[in-house]
Image (cartoon, rainbow, N blue to C red):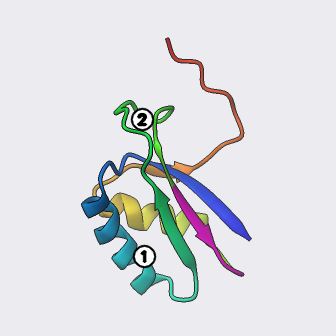
Amino acid sequence: MVEVFITDIRNPSQAAGVLHMLENSFPGLQINFDLDNPEPDFPCRHNILRVQGTAISATLIATAVQESGFRCEVLQDKTCNQL
């Protein structure tokens, strides 16, 4: 199972701290960030957090990231039209 989240985490240092916290909180899951989007407007210009494993609680993961001070939500299957 793979769950994809959008976040407002912008740089490798922020991602490393959150990644460390998530790996400690959710052992056994494979977790990584895609920080290729430099634009600041959340949610449509966001960065990606991918989580892979056999049992994923999207709510618990999003809450853990939010408690670290960042926005995080499950990526919805939709089109974003920003001007």
Looking at numbered disc 1 in the image, what kind of residue is underneath it? Leu
User: Residue 53's x, y, as percent?
Assistant: 67, 78
Q: The N terminus appears in which quarter of the rendering? A: bottom right
- Place residue 55 in its image quadrant: bottom right
User: Residue 57's x, y, as percent?
Assistant: 61, 71
- The residue labelled by disc 2 is 42
Residue under the point 28% across and 56% down = 69
Q: Which numbered dot is residue 59?
A: none
Q: Residues within 10 Å of mark 2 (few under 14, many from 20)?
A: some
Q: Taken as a whole, is the magenta stretch helix, strand or loop?
A: strand
- The residue labelled by disc 1 is 22
Secondary structure under tag 1 reads helix
Residue 58 within the magenta-colored segment of the rendering: no
**What is the magenta range?**
49-54
Drawn side of residue 69 relative to residue 37, left or right: left
> What is the residue that sits farthest to the top in this orientation?
83
- Place residue 81 in its image quadrant: top right
Looking at numbered disc 2 in the image, what kind of residue is underneath it? Phe
- Place residue 76 in its image quadrant: top right
Mark 2–mark 1 Cα distance, whole angstroms, equals: 21 Å
User: Residue 60's x, y, as percent?
Assistant: 51, 69
Residue under the point 45% across and 52% down = 72
Disc 2 and disc 1 in contact, CB within 8 angstroms:
no
Mark before the other along the chain sequence, 2 or 1: 1
- Looking at the image, residue 49 lies above or below residue 20: above
Q: Residues within 10 Å of mark 1 (few under 14, many from 20)?
A: some
Closest to the observer, 52 or 35: 35
Residue under the point 69% across and 33% down = 78
- Looking at the image, residue 53 lies above or below residue 33: below
